[in-house]
Image (cartoon, coloured by chain):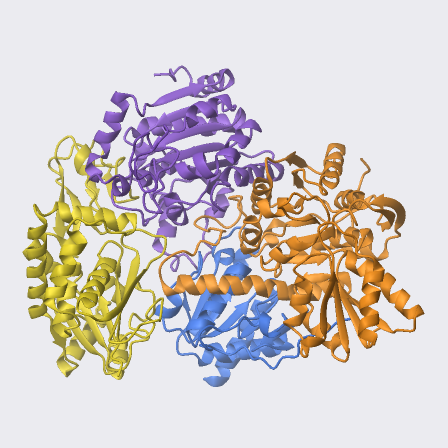
Amino acid sequence: MEERFSIRMSGLGGQGVVTAAHLIGMAASRDGKETAVNPFFGAEKRLAPAESYVRISNMPIHERGEVLYPDIIVIFHSHVVNMGKSYTMPFYDGLRPGGIVLINAEGPHDILPDDMLGLKKLNARIFYVPATKIALDLADTDLSSNLAMIGGLLGVKELVSQEAIRAAIQERFGGAKFIASGTTAALDDVLKSKFSKISQLVEKNMEVIVAAMKQVKEFLYDEESLRIAAAKQQNGGTTMKAALIPSARVNQELCIGCKRCLMTCPDPNVIMYHKAIKKAEVVEIRCKACGLCVAVCPKEAIKIDYYDN
Amino acid sequence: MIEQKVVDPHFMLFEAKREKKFITGSEVVKEAIKRANVDMAISYPITPQSESMHLVGDIYAEGYLKDYYRGENEFAVMSAASGAAMGGVRVFTATGGPGTMRAFEMFPTWSGSRLPIVCAFMTRGINSPLTIQPDTIEMSFLLDTGMLMFHAEAGQDLFDMLLKAFIIAEKTEVHVPIGVFIDGFFVTHTRESIEITPEDMKLPAYDPYSAPVPVMDMENVPIRQIRDPFVMKSNFVSYAAHASWQQEIQAAAERSRKYIHQYLGGLVEVENEGADIMIVASGTAVSQSREAVAMAKKEGINVGLIKVKVVRPFPTEEIRSLTKNAKAVIVPEFNIVGWLCREIKTRIDNNEKVMGGPRVYGGMTMPPELILAEIRRCAK
Amino acid sequence: MKKELLRISPGFEDVMPLEYKELIENGPYFKGYGVNDLGTYKEILEEHPLCAGCGLALALRLTLASLPNPEDTIVVGSTGCNSLGFPQAALQNIHSLFGNQNAVASGLKRALSLRFPDKTKDVVVIAGDGATADIGLDITMHSWFRRENITTIMLDNEAYANTGGQESGMSSKGTVLNMAPTGKKFPKIPVPELARVSGCDYVAVVSPYAPKKLERAVRRAILVAREVGPTYVQIFCPCPTNYKFKPMEALDIVKVKEVDGSYVSKEYFSPEAEELIKRLEGKKDKKE
Amino acid sequence: MELKKVTNYQVLPGPEGFLPPSAASMGIDLPGKDMSLIEGREVLEEEAMQKIAEKLLGAKNPVFFPGPQILWTWKEGVEEKAALIKQMADAVGAKIIPIPNHPNLTIWHNKIDVCVFVGVHCHYANVALKIIRGGSNCYTIALCGVAGHEDAMITLREAGVPSYKRLLEIINEKKGVSK
């Protein structure tokens, strides 16, 4: 009998959603399973919605395109859940009854009550794992968050073996030219640059995966959790912890108001200028943390930092 | 230049006394555009279209148009026409055959951008090998561009269809481009008697603010209001927007039917309705069929003729109803693929009675005798 | 545009999205702002999805901040990374197809001249190097030959970036990029020189890391296009994603290329343009 | 000859299938002069207005979607129209969510059961109306100043100040009755 799992991975561009799907697919293939993996994204860049799909089965797979009716949904970023940065509305649209939702979040998250109700009706099981935090703690880079999400997924369901995942990481980052979109290839290079050797990259990321497997927790639809979720919506929506976000910050004591940073930021209305005090200030929520302002500041008054929104 | 006054289109087209002129199809284009209150025309030479756009240039020089130039190729010309239309002026251009293919990417873009451009297509064969001869194959490629397509039988149709095309294309709920198709040489280079409207009358000017999309002039509702179909975001709404957008372009064509009835008297015309054998044809094939019908009549064979004036939107219900009781349907065409036959076959019941042909292509003339032979065969 | 256009119908002020209100209350229309005012007003460009540290995004932002009359400017873009920015821009803009931007702009400029003979309507083409120098080179040059009164601005990131980093005609000789696996075989297309011989009355090459020079070039180009003839500005926009460097290094890359002569800022005026700019800018020396 | 597609199609709230067809492709015509459409059926404007008032007053979460042509005082007469729309929205307790650009996730986010399009450019209104039918069960109403919108469940055509005034009157009358 066919045992098929259709997985939909949703996140934002640059989070490694496509890479995660690819690694799972490679691992499943190594484990001798049938698998098909495909990404789906618009002509957009980082931070735009990105999805990828993994189908794993013991029988041949013919279906293509978006996984419209997933068994498992893996969510890399809170904005997929609460900001509509999703290909579908609501984010769990099409989830099969009894399906699984795994979210990158630090604590008992707060899916909006209506969505919670919808998921409950489907008898969906909700899991969360602090993937970004684990990545930063253990691999020292948020670029490993996708590996942590793989760990979380394996913690919920052992779709592929750890050995196969290890081999997949080795293959993907270990030299042989991998065909990916230009932007993905560029990010691969950045990830590689974070580690001195490929073996170190593999080990660190395996640590991330194992830690995530252990830390993944199930959300229970008990009264207490539902009450908290409802209270949160009353307070104006979500308080679900997003990943830590890097942003530039101006040390106002050092700022001399030269405006160089203002004219060097590629994004509009990120750095604002206070005419009265002649100081620059960063609107953190808009900053993409490229660091150009840091490079042009003559007084070293700007730094990139991680902050928690 | 003769002083022209703006008149009610209905009066100009249906009531004003017409004058008879013995002119070619190319001259018909000139006479129609002279009366169409066109702001701007852009041209590029290609046989058999060139002469008509020279003549439009001449009336620009006389002062009937406000701007006119020769572009560098058809893709550029059609692009410039779209820029002009987005800027809120009435624009006319023409091409044919390989020129149509060179410009092709722009035609669905015109439709998607809701631009009421009128373009005359003087149809001709498509390479390779090189040909400049008549052939209607390009119409097959254009069927699904979202443009409305009128097919003129001869010069008289051409005159009326061009003027009426501006009126229909510019209706807010329609507002998509219209291609007026004329068979190269058979119509463009044939001289015949045409009844034209008075020279001192012209259509009312285009009102850009009647468009269903904002005009790109920074003078109407302001800012962050893009006009083009930029829906390539990554979420379900974007896909839904693109899907709905495509539906909307087709819906616009559906909405044009009412106006086609009002101005063209319908999408089809029929002769000998209810005959056992019906010919369905468009363009020059209609003219040849008229002769064949007359010849058949002499032989005692009763044959009907459905003239398809409008190919997009397609006269589905009309053809279904008119061919319902026919025993045979003959579709003579001036192209190898038989696109009109295909259109009909996919739309009517019992389509095995539709005869694919006769067909000529590559510049050949279709003698009425060829159609007659088919009629005789069907009558047996 | 008429100033009255920028007024929300009474009763709807409260419900208008903040970004629109900000544009009215604190936007750049009718203000004559320049790059020096950045950070003090609501910009024409909103949050865009271009990469962190994108040189093209910076060039686009600065270009829009340099427009002398944003309230009467219509931008024609083209396919490429820049087309991801324009839907976020608060001025009317057209994305038609790939490579036809100068033809669309020609038709648009002529239409606006017919409809508004007594008003200034600036039509500015902003397109990438692929759109301008490869797929649209003939159309670009023909708009110059025809002496269309439009400004053409090339955001030159020396590659097809939106499709994943392929060689373009503007990539330097020897550069290894996708579709140039053994390195590019011919040098950068000399578009500024082509512009000059094709009749452009003003040509400038600048980079976004000298923002005030960029601003001056954009303004001059638009002012000359209004009154004299076609103009061209080429902006070097290093692409960290496809050229694989850290965004922070962009500035150094510009400097190195300026010094080694492979990408040098320059400016050219026709005599008519020179006279016009002299008149408009007073005694200021424009060739500094 | 004039032949019309005979249709029994009704323009009802979605979702209809995986992707609903456009009403025009199903043979629904725009209303004739002085006429309106209710669910694809041509009726007198008065009847349509009565139904609009009922729908709005009976709605849990009615929303007005004013578009750019009414949000900005870009030409004469807009202010008066805008004031009437505002009064209408207030009278039925509707939220106002501007559509200064094209449609977005608003429609899903806000769980709207009845909505009114007014002052949106016809093309964008048509696209949005189709999207809404595709993905929600919202009852859509269009107060169109031009030819109307067959994809809306109720549409007026050539609606201007007199139509708005009459509609407001009907709403107020019905409100009086229901109270």
The C terminus of chain B appears in which quarter of the rendering? bottom right
Quarter residue A251 falls in: top left
D100, B308: nearer the viewer: B308
Quarter residue C248 falls in: top left
Q: Is A270 positioned to the left or the right of B193 in the image?
A: left
The structure residue drawn at horizontal position 24% and vertical position 51%, both measured from the top left corner, is A178
User: What colour do you see for chain D?
Assistant: blue
C284, A14: nearer the viewer: A14
C275, C161: nearer the viewer: C161
The structure residue drawn at horizontal position 56% and vertical position 61%, both measured from the top left corner, is B249
The N terminus of chain B appears in which quarter of the rendering? top right
Where residue D102 sits in the image (x, y, percent)?
45, 58
The structure residue drawn at horizontal position 83% and vertical position 75%, both measured from the top left corner, is B379
Chain in orange, by letter, is B
- Residue A287 seen in the current view: no
Q: Is residue A270 above or below residue D107?
A: above
User: What colour do you see for chain C?
Assistant: purple
Q: Is residue B258 above or below residue B4?
A: below
Where residue A158 sits in the image (x, y, percent)?
14, 73
Where residue D125 sits in the image (x, y, percent)?
51, 63
Where residue B238 sits in the image (x, y, percent)?
41, 61
Q: Is B188 positioned to the left or the right of D112 in the image?
A: right
Which residue in the rendered view is the most extreme toward the right?
A: B298
User: What colour do you see for chain A?
Assistant: yellow
Q: Is A132 positioned to the left or the right of B123 in the image?
A: left
Figure label count = 0
Q: Is residue A281 above or below residue D26?
A: above
